[in-house]
Image: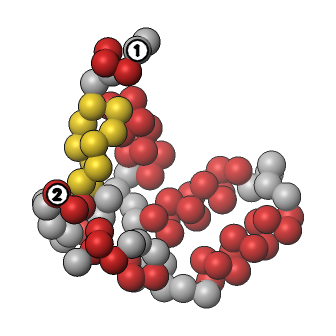
Amino acid sequence: MSKRDKSYSRHHLLPTSRGWANVSKNIEVIPDINHRAIHQLFANKMIAQQLITTLDISSKALRPDVKEWLLEVLNSKDILDPYEWYKEEVIR
Ligand SMILES: [Zn+2]
């Protein structure tokens, strides 16, 4: 499949279902297949919550030191504070 055969759609980086704005800085145009996969796996979760889900899914395969590092990062920040995780230009 060539790139021009793909269908694309608009994905909100910060979920509008959680009150974030439907504005261009918060929208990424991505292939439909990726968009469906994101929402199938992560629903409308914020990035840190997506990482927790990924950690859960991949826990058996992850190296213990990598798992520990990721948990340290996740535990060192407020998982729902977008300023801890997203680029400022996406939030403001
Ligand atoms: Zn989306």
Inspect the image, locate mark 1, and give the three-letter code of the amino acid beneath it: Ser
Name the residue beneath numbered marker 2.
Answer: 24
Q: Of residues 72 and 31, which is closer to you in this image?
A: 31
Q: Marks 2/1: CA distance?
A: 26 Å
Quadrant assignment, res 31: top left
Name the residue beneath numbered marker 1.
Answer: 2
Q: Secondary structure at mark 2?
A: helix
Among all residues in the image, which is located at the extreme top? 1
The N terminus, quarter of image: top left
Q: Of residues 68 and 7, which is closer to you in this image?
A: 7
Q: Is residue 66 visible?
A: yes
Residue 81 point in image, percent of width and height: 39, 82
Inspect the image, locate mark 2, and give the three-letter code of the amino acid beneath it: Ser
Does 89 sit left or right of 76 as displayed?
A: left
Q: Residues within 10 Å of mark 1 (few under 14, many from 20)?
A: few
Q: Secondary structure at mark 1?
A: loop
Work out whether mark 2 precedes mark 1 in sequence or the reverse, and give the earlier one: 1
The disc at residue 75 is none
